[in-house]
Amino acid sequence: MITCYLKYVIDMHKIPEFEEYARRWIPIVNRMGGTHHGYFLPHEGASNIAYALFSFPSLAAYETYRNQMADDAECVATLELEQKNRSIISYERSFMRPVLD
């Protein structure tokens, strides 16, 4: 299993727009073979940092998901919405593997 860890710098004045973006991605990732662990929005502390975590069985499965995104109407619509809203300033993507009991 591989977990994608995303750290977003978001526009603190567009948190509702980012939340809509986040809510759209959760079912998309799940539908396309992943397990979304949720988005985590600012509450206390930094007001412009958000996180997301989702897992795929392997890096190859994640790459398949990434390739399928370009042809998926729901993915394209969600990406276009963010281009319009511009709630994300930047993001970092890392891949981690869990240590489970």
Image: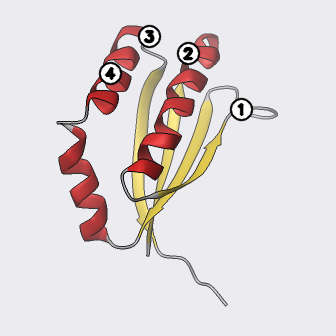
The CA span between labels 3 and 2 is: 7 Å
The circle on residue 42 is 1
Q: In terms of secondary structure, where does tag 4 sit?
A: helix
Q: Amino acid at mark 1?
A: Pro
Picture layout, residue 68 above or below residue 75: below
Q: Amino acid at mark 4?
A: Ala
Write down the residue under mark 4.
Answer: 77
The residue mark sitting in front, 2 or 4, is: 4
Q: Nearer the viewer, residue 13 or 38?
A: 38
The residue mark sitting in front, 3 or 1, is: 3
Image spot of residue 75 (x, y percent): 32, 32
Of the residues under marks 2 and 4, which one precedes in the sequence? 2
Marks 3 and 2 in Cβ contact (< 8 Å): yes
- State left or right for residue 79 relative to residue 60: right
Write down the residue under mark 2.
Answer: 17
- State left or right for residue 87 relative to residue 72: right
Image spot of residue 96 (x, y percent): 46, 69
The circle on residue 85 is 3
The residue positioned farthest toward the bottom in the image shown: 101
